[in-house]
Image (spheres, rainbow, N blue to C red):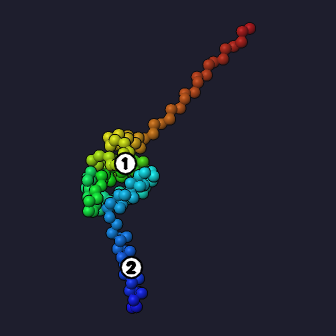
Amino acid sequence: MNYRALVLSLFVSALSAGVANASWYDDYDQGIAAVKRGNWSVVVQKMTAAIKGNPNESDKARAYGTIFYNYHPYYYRGVANLNLGNYEQAIADLEKTQKPGEVDLGPIGANLTRAKEKLREMREPEPEPTRPTPPVAQPSQPAPA
């Protein structure tokens, strides 16, 4: 193998290793950016990846060196699932979270109540529409003679 091929091979290996080892805080940052855009499906994806890397919420989650995060991925994933209509997942996440993160999307209790109401509405059958009763026909009166 010549020198160029070796260097290129090492460069491609380094790139693929960096992509494969995305950190929880990179996923969290991308999820927060998606929160700000209201892109709820990306929020769910990125917060799920962040939780796989670091499942413990904290107001001071240490990423590296002296970099700390106000880290509440369950809150954001819960609100995203609520907005996507995934009410059971929203309830599960909102019950796990400790508090809202840096981007406040409403109180946990209010979001949890909303998710439970939506789930209940979804599960309750639609009431049968009431049909109006037809008017009772009045017997016709003979004309006076």
Q: Nearer the viewer, residue 8 or 19?
A: 8
Residue 103 tag number:
1
Q: Quadrant of the C terminus?
A: top right
Mark 1: which secondary structure? loop
Q: Quadrant of the N terminus?
A: bottom left
Considering every residue shown, the one lying at the far top of the view is 145
Q: Position of residue 125 (x, y in %)?
A: 42, 41
Visible residue check, residue 127: yes
Q: Residue at x 71, y 12 (%)?
A: 143
| Residue kind at label 1, given as amino acid type | Val
Q: Residue at x 37, y 78 (%)?
A: 13
Q: Are marks 2 and 1 in contact (CB under 8 Å)?
A: no
Q: Residue at x 39, y 84 (%)?
A: 7
Q: Earlier in the sequence, mark 2 or mark 1?
A: 2
User: Compared to 37, does 142 lie above or below?
Assistant: above
| Residue kind at label 2, given as amino acid type | Phe
Residue 104 figure quarter? top left
Visible residue check, residue 40: no
Does residue 137 appear to the left or right of 57 in the view shown?
right
Mark 2: which secondary structure? helix
Does residue 145 appear to the left or right of 60 in the view shown?
right
Considering every residue shown, the one lying at the far right of the view is 145
Graded by Cα atoms within 10 Å as few (under 14), some (14 to 19) or many (20 or more), the crowding at tag 2 reads: few
User: Compared to 47, does 132 lie above or below?
Assistant: above
Does residue 67 appear to the left or right of 83 in the view shown?
left
Q: Residue at x 55, y 27 (%)?
A: 133
Q: Position of residue 137 (x, y in %)?
A: 61, 22
Q: What residue is shown with label 2?
A: 11
User: Compared to 2, does 27 lie above or below?
Assistant: above
